[in-house]
Amino acid sequence: MTVLKDRVRVLRGDHPRPAAAPAPRAELPSQLTEFVGRAAELAAIRQVLGSARLVTLLGPGGVGKTRLAVQAAAKVRRAFADGVRWVELGALRDPALLAQTLVDALGIRDRTAGPQQLLADHLRNRQVLLVLDNCEHLLAACAELASALLHSAPELRIVATSREALALPGEHTVAVAPLPVPETDERGDSAVTLFAARARDILPEFSLTDGNLELVRRICVQLDGLPLAIELACARLRVLSPAELADRLGRRMRLLTGGNRAAPERHRSLQATVDWSFELCDPVERRLWTRTSVFAGSFSLKAAEEVCQDDALGSDEIVDGIDGLVGKSLLLREEHDGQVRFRMLETLREYGQAKLTEAHVAGLRDRHHAYYARMIRDVTAQWFGPRQHQWCVELRLEHANLRAAFETAVARAGDGTRLIGAPWFLWAAGFSFSEHRYWLERALHVETEPTPDRARALATLGLVAALQGDRAAASRALAEGTDAAESAGDAFGLAYNWHEQGLVAFFGGDFESSERILLEALDRYRGTEAPPDLIGSLRVHLGLLYIFAGDTHEALRHFEQLRPQCEEHGERWMLSYAVYGLGLTALMCGEHDQAAGHALESLRMKQPFDDAIGLSLATDLLAWSEAARGEAERAAVLLGAAETLWASVGMQLYGSSHWLEQRTRFERQARDRLGDNGYDAAFRRGQEMPRREVLDFALGVRAGVNRARPCETGLSRREAEVAELVADGLTNREIAQKLVISHRTVEGHVEHILDKLGLSRRAQVAQWRNAGG
């Protein structure tokens, strides 16, 4: 009778709230384990439910969408007068039974109408949160039913979990990502915290300690931070120690089985979870899943098109397939420096590779290697030019794929020496000195014939070792490289090895031999295929040599000769070394303000690059200049920062005694002004600064930190003239035309004006003048 009365009221258009006694209780699945983390996602869900009526939690299988939905529903259930209703759809296969499944889950006993109508009538006047768990395999049916219910029940809110969005108007998606794995001891809402909680469920005495934290972190990285994988791994702690578990995770699909028997079947093993995702893909998506597993780290659409395309998979299908895999949360879309890239979790990559035959894997690796070998050739050819910064960004993003390409080259004893030895500047574009040297030594170990490629790779190895301060290893490599170049009749390779021998002699303090060898190398480079960036580096080396030999006039000649060549090509990286050399020359001539200005200019140029050597040199130069100008505390901080920066390269200042003597001289000046305690405190502060903070401090980005001490004697006559024109709003090019000087000279004047006045933008020059400057 009560049901009949409700139906009559609905048909008449009366909408009083049903006279059900108390509001239904929240029928949420019981949770037997502690919920860990996800504070940001919970806050986002809670906030968006205030305005959005459909919220879909998106993420790959095993990422914890269901558990998050349970927790979120429990947090907000008091806001729903008629409670929360949970509907698990994972076991449902027939979309025609979807509405009936909801009828059964909501306990609707009326059978006087079709199931969708019954749902609409039941929910019409109720304030309910309906949670639909695991919608991905019934996507169209779930979207259609959710749309109908939201239109008929104005107080209804729906939270759905899915690997793909329902794509309804007004749908708000919340991305559920794997748990982060912290790089420090901070644990917070992290995979490490979850591992510890689940490990304690198995071994109550388990706790995170300094002794096992790094091991647990490594396990979590191997498991991609996936909560399901972590829970399945912790279940193995009944028979394995954490160290044994970490060693066996290379076979994770077979290892991670036998989880919670009460869980849905697809969540009882990692294999079953990923199988479920694979089954939901169409044939093109499956094919693309397996093929993109050849990439390490993230990859671009262009790379996928070139590596994965063949007669069975065209370019248009690849675009559509990647779109489908992103929509199903099987590929993660990322954006870096304006570039869209895609990344596959390691667990999914391993699964995809297992689906390939050995022949397919070999073919994909060949195409992968060819694509990245071509990229390295392009980078090497175009490095000395306007695309330099962009290439640096791309190399950084492709670091993992380049490693894979290097590995392929070394394993096949093919073009490893050319691939790794030609980009001699690789340590300035995302690779550390240690790693660059590692790959060079591996390639040289397997490619032993005295070819031009081997001769040039040995010269690059000599350069890298010399910059690390390992002059003995550098000399050995360069002697062998010289012999290889002579055997192969390679004029460029011979000049390159000769060049780096001159650098080793300079670092060792043998200025006379260094000058002779470097000048001969410069002569030998003429008429060869020597790239302009390598010749530019030789001019920098000659300039630095002449500074320490006391011939500053000749030093300036080499730096100034390089500068217009860099400007003509739109090059900035090598130019930053020329500017550094100008600053060091100024410092040795007692022009301390000018030296600080050049150091700051060099640092600004180096910001886009991963050039640890250049940053270390320029930071040291700025520290020395500040010490000479009486800014002792700032100098001490910068000296400490420079010491930490050098540690990432090798020996400080190449382990070169004439460089270290200069550092000691300026360090003594700062220490004398501050006293031992004051100097040591400031020095430690610099040592502990992260790299980004070092640059901010040096460049005066932070509030309350001057870019540079304003010059006590004011601007020079020419600088004052340029400052007036800047304040009047003229561009650098207009100033150059008006004063009949080069555009680059104007840029240098503007940099020095900003540095001397302690300003950060040219617009502030007008304010300075108006204030009586």
Image (cartoon, helix red, strand yellow):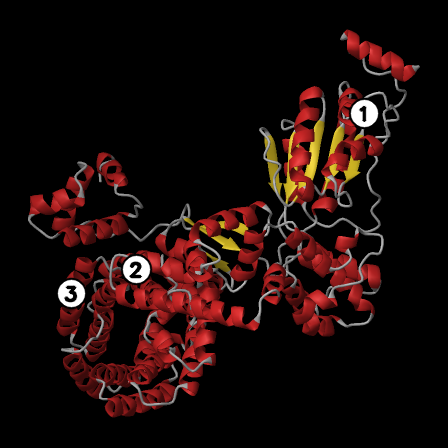
Separation of disc 2 and disc 1 at Cα? Answer: 62 Å
Q: Classify residue 643 by image quadrant.
A: bottom left
Q: Secondary structure at mark 1?
A: loop
Q: Where's the C terminus, which quadrant?
A: top left
Q: Which mark is residue 82?
A: 1
Give the mark toward the camera: 2 or 1.
1
Label 1 near label 3: C-beta < 8 Å? no
Kind of residue indicated by mark 3: Glu
List x then y, in percent, for residue 336: 44, 51
Q: Nearer the viewer, residue 765 or 325?
A: 325
| Up-down relation of residue 478 to residue 189 (above or below) | below
Residue at the spot 62% in from the left edge and 36% down from the top edge = 166
Q: Secondary structure at mark 3?
A: helix
Q: Nearer the viewer, residue 66 or 292?
A: 292
Mark 3 or mark 2: which comes first in sequence? Answer: 2
Q: Which residue is mark 2?
A: 388
